[in-house]
Image (cartoon, rainbow, N blue to C red):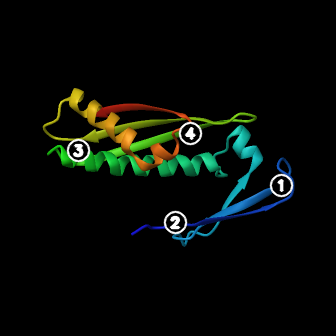
Amino acid sequence: MPVTSEAAASWTGSLTEGSGTVAFSSSNLGTFPIDWKARSEGSDTTTTPEEMIAAAHASCFSMALSHALTENGTPPERVNTSASVTFKPGTGITGSHLNVNATVPGLTPEKFQEIAEGAKTGCPVSQALAGIEITLEASLA
């Protein structure tokens, strides 16, 4: 059965002078501020669409990798993934870089790399991002 997830954004003003908020239907954390300056110049205090995509990509990949490792007979003890999504004003989103470090007893680094590459390809968010370059750094703890 399909599951639909929701978020909502509100924006006031022009692109460069305006600002807004985003909220997730599953969260009781309230709203998160968004604005063009943060998106085009970076910010430690204001979120961006790319940060939200990075969160989606990191979490989806972690789940896909955990599943693939378990299917291989080597379930992970721990999987830590970060995703860095790049936005270039005037061009758009140009790439997502996954960096994963995992503790997986009984697995060689070569086999881990192979399984991680497969999870990168099979991850539904990776598939949704097929129009951009997706890179991967994978290491065992």
- For the C terminus, the image quarter is top left
Q: Going by the image, does 14 lie left or right of 84? A: right
Question: Which badge, 4 or 1, is on the more N-terminal residue?
Answer: 1
Whether residue 128 appears in this view of the structure is yes
Q: Residues within 10 Å of mark 1 (few under 14, many from 20)?
A: few
Question: Which badge, 2 or 1, is on the more N-terminal residue?
Answer: 2
Q: Which mark is residue 5?
A: 2
Task: State whether residue 97 is above or below residue 63.
Answer: above
Task: State whether residue 55 is above or below residue 27.
Answer: above
* Of labels 2 and 1, the one closer to you: 2
Label 2: element kind: loop
Q: How far is mark 2 from mark 1, CA to CA?
A: 26 Å
Label 3: element kind: helix
Q: Going by the image, does 139 lie left or right of 9? A: left
Q: How far is mark 3 from mark 2, CA to CA?
A: 26 Å
Q: How far is mark 4 from mark 1, CA to CA?
A: 23 Å
Identify the residue under disc 4. Answer: 85
Q: Position of residue 48 (x, y in %)?
A: 65, 49
Query: Residue at the spot x=65%, y=51% of the render?
Result: 45
* Of labels 4 and 2, the one closer to you: 2
Q: Residues within 10 Å of mark 4 (few under 14, many from 20)?
A: many
Along the viewing direction, whichever of 48 and 69 lies nearer the viewer: 69
Identify the residue under disc 1. Answer: 18
Question: Which badge, 4 or 3, is on the more N-terminal residue?
Answer: 3
What amino acid is found at the position of numbered circle 3 in the picture? Leu
Query: Residue at the spot x=39%, y=39% of the render?
Result: 121
Q: Position of residue 140 (x, y in %)?
A: 26, 34
Q: Position of residue 132 (x, y in %)?
A: 55, 35
